Amino acid sequence: MVILLVIALTLYLAGAFYSIYTFATKSKRPDRDLKLIIGLGFAAHTAAIVAAWQEAGHFPVVSPKEVSSFIGWAIAGYYLAVSRRYNTRALPAFLLPLVYLFMFVSLLLPARAEAVPRMLESAISASPLTQIIFPVHVTLVIASYAAFAVTFVCGMMYLIQERELKAKRLGANSERLPALNTCDEIGYRSVTIGFVLLTLGVATGIFWNNQRDGRYWHNDPKEVMALITWIVYLFPIHYRVTAGWRGRRAAWMSIAGFAVVILTWLGARALGGYHVFG
Amino acid sequence: MGSGEKPTPSPLPTPHSPLPILMGIVIVGTSHKTAPIEVRERLAFAESRLAGALRDLVDREMISEGLIVSTCNRVELIAATPKGAHAPENAVSRLYDFLSRFHQYDLSPMRKHLYDLAGPAAIKHVFRVTSSLDSMVVGEPQITGQIKEAFHRAQEAAVVGHELTRLMNRAFAVAKRVRNETGIGSSAVSISFVAVELARKVFEDLKGSAVMLLGAGEMAELAAKHLLNYGASRLLIVNRTFENAVALAGELNGEPVRFEEFEKRLPEAEILICSTGAQDYLIHPDQVRRALERRRNRPMLLVDISVPRNIDPAIGRLDNAFLFDVDDLESIAEANRAERKREALRAEEIIEAEAEQFFRALAEGDLNAVIGAFRQQVYEMAFSEFERSRKRLGDLSEDQERALQVMINAIVNKFTHPVIKQLRESEERVVCGVKARLPPDRIRPLHPPLPAN
């Protein structure tokens, strides 16, 4: 299993360097080779996660180590999906280092001695249904983080490109980055996908709560933060549909939203509650 | 051995060619860099006379293949000489003669406006010209197409063969490489093209987008044409005088719009190009703000080519509106020109390497041809000896027959090996500034008789 992770890590690193190189040199060649590298890395990573699942006997998204690796996996997968449609050199140059970073952090973090906290153990095994719900709930939420990460990157790219255009420069940065409409389009699609995933993730969480102890909501810090995240992303989508909010405003919203995502992921952990893991 | 045999025709290259094939490419030409328009126009080849000129050029004696590139900026005669038949100087003077004779024009006082090249220098020149490094606007893409066209014309006239086909195919591949690997042709260096570049920075794909042209003017019309070429699907033409709008719309295949309807139609346009003689701002921030609202904030690109300006610069501060005036366009074009110069240096490196590689491959091809012919000849001699003795040996079993065959092969290999090894390991020589392993200047015929020493 470790060997699979090392293979994935190596391929992600190669992909990250390669994409940064092509980004820096403003290469215009299609990124077929990059997709192949990341595709293989993703396959190795998937195999590693499946192996870890078998070994641990529970879905391996419990310890921070596992969660970090899983976020990297989700972003890599999301990149592969986006690259089928958009051939942009800039997106992987930002995303792949992020994937590598999550993977690297995951390898550094210690494996926890106690594999599954007792509270989680009882929550998972409350009923046959909750055993299925655990992987579904976690996968949905983390996949939404990956989509929001892409939205965040698109927002950044949009703001840089927009600043170049407003300054009436078409410098190297402008040449490397996708057109405004492309940043906006990928960003909006991603935020929509992320929002749907998050909604389903929260819904499965609520359902799970109910299965466990008949209460829908516990005011757990993570629950509250997730609700805030959900509302923060509801705004740009709502105003896009009703008032045509797009461009710079949407880009800033996506950056603010991602800050809340990071807070939800790491901050809620510091505040305690039953989402102590991950 | 072989004393009574009639000599078989030697497949070796003519023994007297000092540098076979390599010197086979010669060029005589003139370009915007060496000659004023008065000279170039006298030497240009009219489309209608090209086929005749090509047949005239290739006399099969000193010139075996040829093609003529004739554009407003250059005339190039690119020719190949028969293998090793003549020194390149003769072929070059033959090209001068042809040029002078064809145009009935005394070239002797014009020599300083013309250049001639042979061998590696000629190869490099072909690569540079095809890759648009020798163009007036470095990196402009038309020249590659023009040379392709010239090559097709020569093919139609059946005056190109193996040598020029190999050279030109390589030249087109090099041009493609230069375009892909350097930014030499990627940025716009004229104002009207900068508008296209800007549009693609905002919209990426112009498919389905509408361009509105307010007023008229050469530069504005050119920009509109470029935008249509790059995928814009609609052109709205607004003019104070509706008749002018109708006329221009007919010419550019657009839709005329009355000036009174300008504001109503403005939200339809992704791109507005403004070029009128008005002395004041025609377009105000409120108009654009309303248009953006109606567009649900989908971005707009506004290009103001008029002087004095017709679009209020305050519009540039609106979200999702991107405004450029003529100075902005010019400074972008200028920056792009500087960028092109830097990229041209990288392109020169690519061409240097490619020309050297091509030249070396030619030399290697020569060497392999010589070695192959040599080995073949020795084998044939040995085999014919075997055939003669074979009759006297009587019936042989299949095994014995095979054993003899193997022996002949082994003998040929052992005999030829030291010679081939020497050829392959012969020192690289510097020819015209390029290092290459060439076949020996003279190859003595092997047969008959095989040298005793």
Image (cartoon, coloured by chain):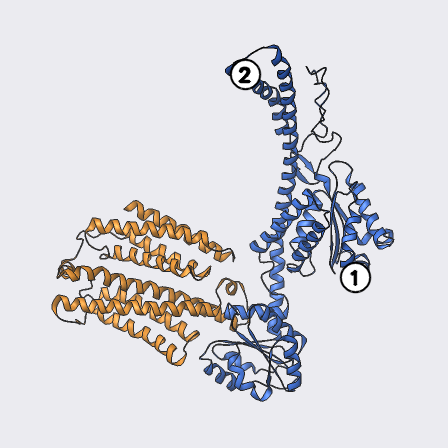
Chain colours: A orange, B blue
Residue at x-position 49% and y-position 71%:
A163
Q: Which residue is mark 2?
A: B401
Q: Secondary structure at mark 2?
A: helix
Question: The N terminus of chain B is located in which quarter?
Answer: top right
Where B270 sits versus B453, above or below? below
Instruction: Report the Cα–Cα distance between label 1 and label 2.
Output: 75 Å
With respect to residue B362, does B408 lie above or below?
above
Asked whether residue B349 is in view, the answer is no
Residue A215 x %, y %:
14, 71
- Indicate the amino acid at tag 2: Glu
- In percent of width and height, residue B425 lies at 61, 28
Task: Give the amino acid at mark 1.
Answer: Ile
Residue A139 drawn above or below residue A38: below
Q: On the image, numbered disc 1 is attached to which residue?
A: B37
Viewer-side residue, B82 vs A37: B82
Is residue B200 left or right of A271 when viewed as pictured?
A: right
Local crowd size for mark 2, using a 10 Å CA cut-off: few (<14), some (14–19), many (≥20)? few
Residue at horizontal 35 percent and vertical 52 percent from the top: A42
